[in-house]
Image (cartoon, rainbow, N blue to C red):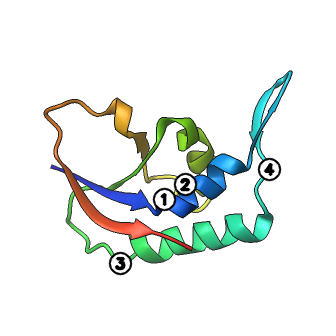
Amino acid sequence: MLPAYLLAPDLEETIRGAIRQTSAGSYLAIDPAVAQRFTARCKQVIGQLKPGRHRPVILVSIDIRRYVRKLIERELYDVPVLSYQELTEEITVQPLDRIAI
C-alpha cells in the first residue's frame, strides 16, 4: 500500500501550462504567487499526517514530476514525488487527499 497525495487536475494543468521549452532545455515559468500557494497548501495537507504512518508520496503525471519536485524541495525536501509510470502493478495506491489551490 502506497499512501499518496494527488494533485487536482486543474493544478496539474496549471503546472503543465507553465513549462517553457527552449533550445537549452525546459524550465517552469510559474507565477511566484501560485508557486507559494501550492507549497503552502502541500505543507498544510501533508502536515496533517499523523506520526508513525507510512511515509507518503506526491503522485503526479510524469511530464510534471520534476517541476513539482523543484517547487516543494525547499519546504518538503523529504517528501518523494513519483509519477504513475514509476509504479509497478503490485503497488496499490492509497489516496490520502487531493491537493488543490
Label 4 environment density (alpha carbons within 10 Å; few <14, some 14–19, many ≥20): few
Residue at 84% across, 23% down? 24
The reply to whether callout 1 and callout 3 are in contact (CB within 8 Å) is no
User: x, y percentage for residue 53?
Assistant: 20, 64
Q: Nearer the viewer, mark 4 or mark 3?
A: 4
Of all residues, the one furthest to the right in this rendering is 23
Residue identified by numbered label 1? 9
**C-alpha gap between disc 1 and disc 2:** 5 Å
Is disc 1 placed on a helix, strand or loop? helix
User: x, y percentage for residue 83?
Assistant: 41, 39
Residue identified by numbered label 3? 48
Note whether residue 58 is visible: yes
**C-alpha gap between disc 3 and disc 2:** 22 Å
Q: In the image shown, does 73 or 24 lie closer to the viewer?
A: 24
Residue 4, quarter of picture: bottom left
Residue identified by numbered label 4? 29
The reply to whether callout 1 and callout 2 are in contact (CB within 8 Å) is yes
Q: Nearer the viewer, mark 3 or mark 2?
A: 2
60 up-or-down from 53: above or below: above
Residue type pointed to by label 2:
Glu
**C-alpha gap between disc 4 and disc 3:** 29 Å
The number of callouts visible is: 4
- 65 horizontally vs 55: left or right: right
